[in-house]
Image (spheres, helix red, strand yellow):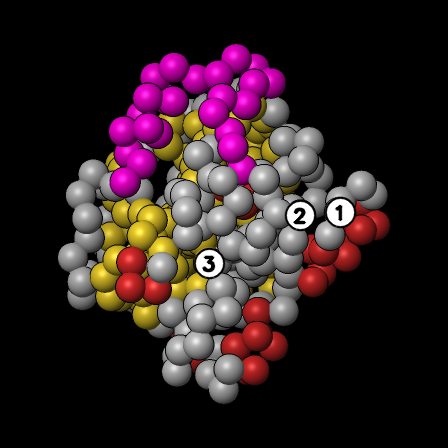
Amino acid sequence: MTNHTLGLAFAAAVACSGADARHEATGTASDDIKMGTPATAYAEAVTVTTDGYIPCSGVLLAPTVVLSAGHCQGIKKTYVVTAPNANGQSARSSTSWTPYDGHPATSSDVLLIFLDTPIQLASYPTLSGSEVAPGTGVVDIGRTLNGTIGTDDNVSPPVTIEGDGSSLGFPFNYQALPDISEDGDSGGPIMLAGTHTIVAIVDTDTVEQNIAETTPIDLFARIDLVKGAIEQQIAHPPANGGDAGSSGTGTTKGGGGGCSVAAPGR
């Protein structure tokens, strides 16, 4: 799929909104595990609009640094970031960094967006530097509620980390149940329950990756594996309009909540 015109891009965005149909096709209920509540306690949660139309989610790490998903990177690489629970503050960017190579099985699907102007918060979240143990409770935060992509952020019911994703072929990810993220949630933070500690971001799932499971499994991009690289980029950000170290092609599926610009994902 190409994105040379807004019309085609809009069609892609519409195609990315079929979360409920996808889950119904696998014989699983969706509404009972997707009911979220307003994420008013998470001022750091943001919405991300890429190249004017692709909706994703993200989280502020610092006044001018946003963490999102690598597959949310656009062709033009322009972004508008809005913090709905921080008085609606908004900022633009054309500067980013990602180690994503186009597939979450072979690279970390994370993206840093460097804002042109700051979004000020009273405090910012922390990044986890250690692996999360199986059985740990987390919540995911994103801009979609029961199949509708909106301009506000919502926090999910409890989700459990089941272990890393190596057994499914995704060593850069965690496995998690229930599969609660939807279209538009990609890049949204996965927080340790009751904290502001980011352990992962919404990425993809077994349905999108064509992996047959009785119950769909969420695949969250782990932060501990790239924490050092993220901190290095924050300490030495690329110049305005730059694209430091980006290798992503944006040509594969891989979106636990947003959608890749060049192919429908979440």
The answer to whether residue 10 is left or right of residue 46 is right
Vertical order, 66 against 47 (above or below): above
- Please tell me how crowded label 3 is: few (under 14), some (14-19), or many (20+) other residues with Cα within 10 Å: many
Q: Residue at x 33, y 49 (%)?
A: 172
How many marks do you count on the picture? 3
Q: CA distance from mark 1 to mark 2?
A: 6 Å
| Mark 1 lies on residue | 2
**Amino acid at dot 3:** Thr
Please, is residue 163 above or below residue 250 in the view? below
In depth, the one of 144 and 113 nearer the eye is 113
Q: Secondary structure at mark 1?
A: loop
What residue range appears in magenta? 225-248
Callout 3: SS: strand
Separation of marks 2 and 3 at Cα, in angstroms: 15 Å
Q: Looking at the image, is mark 1 or mark 2 earlier in the sequence?
A: 1
Foreground pick, 48 / 249: 249
Q: Does residue 245 show up magenta in the picture?
A: yes
Q: Are marks 1 and 2 in contact (CB under 8 Å)?
A: yes
Residue 45 in sight here: no
Mark 2 vs 3, N-terminal side: 3
Q: Which residue is mark 3?
A: 204
Identify residue for label 2. 262
Q: Between disc 1 and disc 3, whose residue precedes?
A: 1
- Residue at 41 percent across and 47 percent down: it is 106
Q: Position of residue 201 (x, y in %)?
A: 39, 49
Coordinates of residue 104 in the picture (x, y in percent): 44, 50
Looking at the picture, how far across and down is residue 198, in whole percent?
A: 30, 44
Question: Looking at the picture, how far across and down is residue 229, in whole percent?
Answer: 33, 28
Say few, some or many: other residues with alpha carbon within 10 Å of mark 2 (under 14 / 14 to 19 / 20 or more).
Answer: many
